[in-house]
Amino acid sequence: MEGRGKIWVKRFTGVSLFLIIIFVASWSQSTESIVEKMDVDENHIIKLESGEQGSLELSKIGYYIAFRFNENGSQIEPELRMTDMEGNNIEGREPGLIESNNKRPNASGKIVYIPVRVFEIQNDAEYILVNDGDTTLWLIDELDIQASLFSDWWVVVSMISCFLGFPMAIITLIMGLILWRRKDKSPEKEIIIQQNIMTTDELFKKYNSIEGNQVPNPFMKNESSLPELTAEDKLEDIDIENSDKKETESQREESENNWKNWDEG
């Protein structure tokens, strides 16, 4: 199991590094595309200066947000009106939590466009928008801008590589730590080499190269192993034995004479 785990960790590491490299390489180009498409002054349905009004065609499948210019980046009042061609007022709603944080940068990347009103149209028709404020007013179709972002392949590649590369790297790191901890906790395996211990007889056989089951006792003299004595060697042995006997008898006689002398006083 640990072997398979190591293989998958290596695979995930390679894939995550590849995706992160792609994200880093595409990040600069994708950021430029995002800033360009999110620029309200370049991508809007209508732009109205203070006191102006204009008519526009809106669709019920659209998602419309009104923005005002504010260099401080703080929330400001909407100060606008929208009516249909019959004079019915279209209230809209205040920006929610997501829309309030959807502030837009200008071409230089500075946050200057603040969402002030959200419109969800019920019918496809022509409407009139009036700017009652003192600053410039823009109306954009958020869905159209989001669609244009996903149609840019630089943005798509950057998003996919980011959303897959970094989570995969975190998962790989966790898997590596788990395998490392398992390796430390696993008991050490003792390697036992089994080897037959030779007996004394087997060692004696091997040393003397003796075949067969009968092995002579190492403490007994083996006559077959003694060299044969010549006639001269035998005569020398007899002479040595005779001289030894004579010396023994002379020593015995001397000890007897010494005893007699001592006893007689």
Image (cartoon, rainbow, N blue to C red):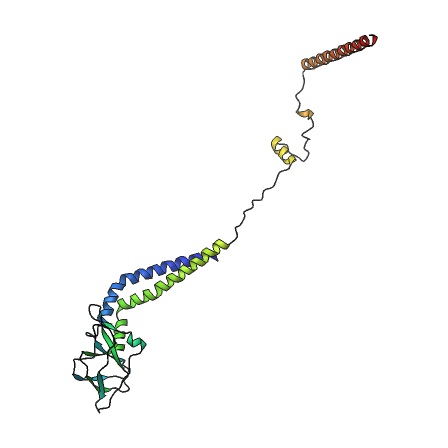
Q: Which image quarter: residue 217?
A: top right
**Residue 231, percent from left and from top:** 69, 14
Residue at the location (26% across, 73% down)? 103
Residue at the location (34% across, 66% down)? 163
- Residue that lies at the very extreme toward the bottom in this rendered image: 86
**Residue 13, percent from left and from top:** 38, 58
Q: Which image quarter: residue 143?
A: bottom left
Q: Which image quarter: residue 38?
A: bottom left
Q: Nearer the viewer, residue 263 or 233?
A: 263
Q: What is the count of numbered marks? A: 0
Residue at the location (50% across, 55% down)? 185
**Residue 124, percent from left and from top:** 25, 86
Residue at the location (32% across, 67% down)? 160
Q: Nearer the viewer, residue 52 or 230?
A: 52
Q: Is 214 placed above or below 65 here?
A: above
- Residue that lies at the very extreme toward the right in this rendered image: 264
Q: Is 38 placed above or below 19 here?
A: below
Q: Quadrant of the C terminus?
A: top right
**Residue 5, percent from left and from top:** 45, 58
Q: Is 31 placed above or below 245 here?
A: below
**Left or right, residue 103 beside residue 213:** left
**Left or right, residue 179 beside residue 27:** right
